[in-house]
Amino acid sequence: MWLGLSVVVLAVTVLPPDGHADTIYLKNGRKIVAQVTREDPKQVFYEVPGGELAIPRGLVDHIEKSPLPTPDAEGGGNTPPSARGQELPLPPSPLAQSSAEENSPVIKDGAVDEGYLQRLEYDMTHTTSPDNAHLLKQAFQQAGVFLMRKGDPEGAILRYSEALKFFPNDLSLTLALGYLEVSQSHFFEAMDLLLPASDQHPESPDILLLLGSAYYGMENLDQAIAEWNKALAIQDNPGLREAVARAEREQSVAGSYLELHSEHFLLRYEGREIEKLSGEVLNSLEGSFRDLVTDLDYSPRETIVVILYPNQGFRDITRSPNWVGALNDGKIRVPVSGLKTVDTELARVLKHELTHSFVRQITVGRCPTWFNEGLAQLEEGATTASLGTRLAKALAAGQLPPFQALEGTFANLPSEQVGLVYGKSLAALEYLRDTFGMGEIRRLLKAMSSNPDLNSLFQDEFRLDLPAFEQEVANYVAKRYGA
C-alpha cells in the first residue's frame, strides 16, 4: 500500500485460514500465533501458508491452545478473509496434512534421497502392488513437504508433478499440487491441472476453490465467481463468500476496462482518456522490474496484474483505510484520477507496490510486514530525512510498537502512528543496507522462505536478537538526526 511519500503493504501472518490460532510463547519473550499441527518431545510443528515449520521444544515456554471451529462438512476447508490482506482464497495447506519426518527414508543428509525415490519408482513400474504404491506416494508427499519446509516451493511442485504421473487421479496429490501452483501464481499450470480434476472430483469444494482462484489470478472474474459459487453450493465458507463479494465489486466496473500487455504485466484501465497514461505506466513498471531483478537477484516468472482505478472505484473495491494510497493484494491496484502522465510520485508508487510482488514470491509470503514495508520504501527511493527528528524522539521515548508487534497487518494502526511506523520500518532497512549491504538483505529475504522467525535469522546472521536490533536501529536514527 502507499501512504503519502511512502507506502503500506499487505499483511503477512501465520494465522490459519479459519482465523483460529494457538499461541506459542517462547522463552525469549517472543510469541508465534499459528495453528499447532503436532508436537513431539523435540519439536513443535505449526502451520504456515506453504506447509509446516518446526521450532525446537527447548525454545518453547508454553502453548495456549485456541478451540477449533466445528467444520460444516467433512473434509472441507476455510478460506482466509480478504480483509487480512491475503491475495487469493486458498484452502488449508494440504501439505500440512502429511509430514516429512526426520527419520523418513526419502530424506537423507538434509536432502531428498534421489536413489531411494528411483528404487521405489522402479519397484512400482515392475510390480504394481498396494504396498509399492503406498510407499511411493508417501515418499513423494514427504519429499514435497520437506522441500516446502526448506523454502523450495518449485522443488515441491516438481515432486508432486512426478507423483501424479504414477497416481493421475489422486485427490490429495492434486490438491497439494494445485495449492502450490496457485499460491506461487502459476495460474496457467494450475488451470491445466484443475480443469480436468473438477470433472474427476466434482464433490470436492477445494478443487473448485483453487480453480476459481486461478481464474481470479488470470483476471477472469466471471469464471472465478462461477467456480467459487460452485464450491459454496457444496460447502458454505464465510471467507470464500467474502472473496466472491469482492470479485463481484470488481466485476461491476470491469466491463468498461481496457487491457494492455507487456512482457511481465497485464494492465487494466478504464477509459480512452488515460490510454496514454496506461502506456507510460507499463514502461515505468518494466523499468522498475529490471531494477528489482538486479537489486533482489530474483525474477518473477508469472504475469503481474496491475489495475488503474478512478479514486472512488479504488475505495469501493479495496475497502481500504483512507490513508492508503495504493494496494498490492496480489494485484497492484492504483487510483489515478486526474493524472495525465507518470510523474515522479506515481513512478515511486508503482515501484513500491511492485517490490511487494517480488518479496511475496521470494519469501513464499513469509516476510514480516515491517521488513516488507521498509524494503519497498527503500526501493522506491524514500528516505527517513523528512521525519528524522520526530522519529528519533519517538524511538528514544519508546512511543512506537516494537518490530515484534509489526509483523502482521498495519491496517489497525492508530492514524497518528501510521507515518512514524512506516518511518521506523524504513529506518530499519536503511540501517541494514548501510551497515551490512544489500547482499545481506537479499540473503535474509531468501532465508525467510524456510524460516519466517526473524529473531532466529537475526541471531544467525548478525548475532543480534530483535530487541537488540531494535536498539541498534534507534541508535542509528539518533546518530543521524539526534534525539
Image (cartoon, rainbow, N blue to C red):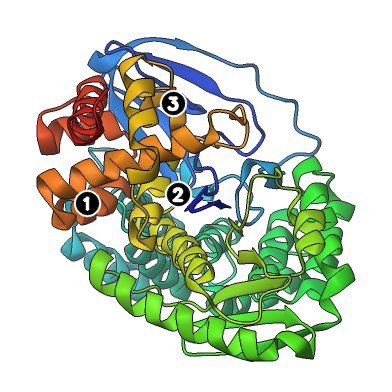
Badge 1 crowding class, 10 Å Cα cut-off, few under 14, some 14 to 19, many 20 or more, is some
Badge 3 crowding class, 10 Å Cα cut-off, few under 14, some 14 to 19, many 20 or more, is some
Residue 202: tell me if it is visible.
Answer: yes
Rounded to the nearest whole Å, what is the CA distance between mark 2 and mark 3? 16 Å
Residue 235, percent from left and from top = 83, 47
Q: Is residue 245 above or below residue 259?
A: above
Residue found at x 30% / y 27% = 55
Residue under numbered circle 3: 38
Residue under numbered circle 2: 50
For marks 3 and 1 on the same chain, the one whose residue lies earlier in the sequence: 3
Nearest to viewer (mark 2 / mark 3) = 2
Residue found at x 43% / y 54% = 134
Image quadrant for the C terminus? top left
Please name whichever residue, 63 or 6, is drawn nearer the observer in this view of the structure: 6
Give, as a three-letter code, the residue at label 2: Gly
231 displayed left or right of 399: right
Residue 203: tell me if it is visible.
Answer: no
Q: Is residue 162 above or below residue 134?
A: below
For marks 2 and 3 on the same chain, the one whose residue lies earlier in the sequence: 3
Residue 120, percent from left and from top = 29, 64
Give, as a three-letter code, the residue at label 1: Ile
34 displayed left or right of 251: left
Residue found at x 37% / y 59% = 140
Badge 2 crowding class, 10 Å Cα cut-off, few under 14, some 14 to 19, many 20 or more, is many
Judged from the image, the secondary structure of the residue bearing numbered disc 1 is helix
Residue found at x 29% / y 34% = 454
Residue under numbered circle 1: 441
Nearest to viewer (mark 2 / mark 1) = 1
For marks 2 and 1 on the same chain, the one whose residue lies earlier in the sequence: 2
Judged from the image, the secondary structure of the residue bearing numbered disc 3 is strand
